[in-house]
Image: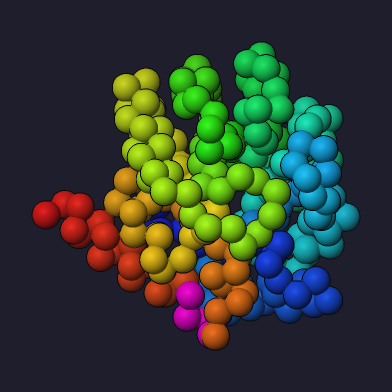
Amino acid sequence: MPDRLLVAPSILSADFRDLGGAVRLIEDAGADWVHIDVMDGHFVPNITMGVPLLKALRPATDLVLDAHLMVSNPLRQIPWFLDAGADVVTFHLEAVDDDEARTAIADIKAAGAKAGVSVKPNTGLERLDPLLPEADMVLIMSVEPGFSGQSFIEGSDARVSEVKRRAQEAGTEVLVQVDGGIGEATVGCVVAAGADCVVCGNAFFKAPDPLQVPRLLRQAAEKAEKGAVQ
C-alpha cells in the first residue's frame, strides 16, 4: 500500500479549453494521478471524454493516467485505452458478469496496467469477493456516477472498511480508491476507513488555490489516521 494518500484530480472538472494546462497544474500541485472519467451516455446519463483525449495526454505527462470507464461495453473498450497509454483502467462491475469481470482484469494486467473494479453506491460488495485476489484496485463510488460536483453519500466510508475487511479475509491486499464529493471535509472519514487514493474534481479545480489542495487533503488524512489509531 502507498506510504501516503494518493490524490487523483479528475479532469472532468477542469477547463476543457486547456486540458494540457490542467495536467500541468496537477503536476505542479504534487498530485499523483490524472483521473479521466469516461462516460458513454448509456451506462451513465452523460457523455464526456474518450480514447483520443487520453492518447493526447500520454506524451504530455509522466503521471499515472487513471481511466475510469463508465461504459456499458468495457470488454470492447478496454484494449483501446490500454493502447492509448492508460496506466490504470477501471471498469464497472455492474456492466459485466462475473466471467467477463475476470477476463477484463486479466486483459488489463496482461498489458502491464493496473486493473480496477468500480462499484456504484447501491451495489452489493459481496460480488467483489472472487475478484479481490486478482484486481489491483477497487473504486468505491461515493456518489451516483454520471456528473461532477455531487455531494458525498454518507456511509460510503463504511463500504471502504468492508472492502478492506473482505480483502483481508481473502488473504490479499487491494488498493481502495474513493470517487465522489471528496474534499477536506470528507477525506478524513474515508482515509480512516482504509482508503488509499481519492479522486477530487471540483475540490481541486474550483479551489481558490488548487496548488494547495493535495497538501491539505493529505494533512486532513494524516489527522484522521492518527485519530483512528488513538
Task: Count numbered badges in the picture.
Answer: 0
* Image vertical order of residue 229 relative to residue 103, above or below: below
In the image: residue 201, left or right of residue 219: right
In front of the other: 42 or 67:
42
**Residue positioned 39% across, 44% down in the render:** 155
Rendering coords of residue 62 (x, y %) = 65, 64
Is 211 magenta? The answer is yes
Name the spot of residue 148 as percent of width and height, x first.
66, 59
Q: Residue furthest right?
A: 52
Which residue appears farthest toward the left when viewing the image?
230
Above or below, comparing residue 143 to residue 117 in the picture = below
Q: Residue 21: image x %, image y %?
A: 73, 78
Q: Look at the image and say whether residue 191 sits in the magenta stretch.
A: no
Residue range (magenta): 209-213
- Judged left or right of residue 100, residue 144 is left
Pick the front one: 188 or 7: 188
Q: Residue at x 41, y 37 (%)?
A: 159
- Seen from the viewer's position, the closer of residues 156 and 138 is 156
Confirm whether residue 173 shows in the render. no
Residue under the point 50% across and 17% down: 130
Give how far across and how far down residue 112 sits, in percent: 65, 38
